[in-house]
Image (cartoon, rainbow, N blue to C red):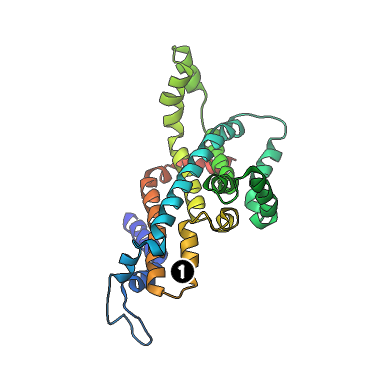
Amino acid sequence: MKNIKNLLLILITVVLFLPFLPLLIWSFAKGWYFPQLIPEQWTLQHWIQLLLPTTRVVEGLLQSLAIAFMTTLLSLLVGLPAGRAIGLMEFPGKAALKLFLLTPIIVSPLATLMGIQFVLIRLGLNGTIPGVILVHLMPTIPYMTLVLASVFANFDPSYEIQARSLGASPMQVFSQVTLPLIAPGLVVGALFAFLISWNEFLLTFFVGAGRVFTLPMVLFTLLQGGNNGLIAAVAITSVIPGLLFLLVSSKALQNEVTLGGLGNV
């Protein structure tokens, strides 16, 4: 049974990563033309080009990382209390609140983008990194809140009550009791928020106004140039941070308590 499970995992991994094989070959190819099965000449030129200021890849990478990390942090700050309230408490309008949280996921961003951009222009945030971070919170906060709500739906508050009765302060209860119990859910929610923000193009394109240059925008610009080798190198670079984040979070993703609670929301 274990061998079959491992075989299936290997098969799924191969299927998931198979589309990246042509990209990997292109990134090292010095020309790859039909009917060649593999390129006849290889080069590191495309990877060296990533470091050149003219390609703006390093600038896009740093801005993408800064925006994704700040979006994840702010999503946690908002999603943690909201998820606790939805997961643990019963109050009038709870079902309507869940539906409201799903609205940014259900409704196309284009439908609300013009109104949001008008507000950001009035606030002087259009074309700035803080403005892009704010607009990235639209899709990330619902995911974070719903994931944490599912975790708190399986959370037993009596552990906190027992710690308080033994003299622990609210901060000690949170750091030593609550946080370890919900840590897997926090990691899963952070993973969702980071990946959504990292790959977001449309919202960044409109709100960034060409002054905020993230890695997806670098890739979009290069796609119009036709340099397949450089495009492949940038595409692979854009996948690496997400994979690293996923590997770090892999232990939490295997937690049955965390994932099992998703069905309780």
Which residue lies most toward the bottom here? Answer: 35
Question: 214 above or below 257?
Answer: below
The percent position of residue 217, horizontal first and vertical second, equals 50, 61
| Whether residue 191 can be seen here | no
Q: Is residue 245 left or right of residue 261?
A: left
Circle 1 is placed at which residue position?
A: 222
Residue nearest the observer in this picture, 222 or 34 = 222
Left or right: residue 64 versus residue 138 is left
Amino acid carrying mark 1 in the image: Leu
Mark 1 Cα shell of 10 Å, populated few (<14), some (14-19), many (≥20): some
Q: Is residue 228 left or right of residue 117?
A: left
Q: In the image, is residue 95 above or below residue 39?
A: above
x and y percent of residue 198 in the render?
48, 53
Residue placed most toward the observer, 120 or 65: 120
Which of these two is toward me, 91 or 170?
Answer: 170
Q: Is residue 15 visible?
A: yes
Against 173, residue 94 (above or below) is: below
Q: Report the quarter where the C terminus lies.
A: top right
| Residue 52 pos. (x, y %) | 35, 63
Q: Is residue 188 left or right of residue 94?
A: left
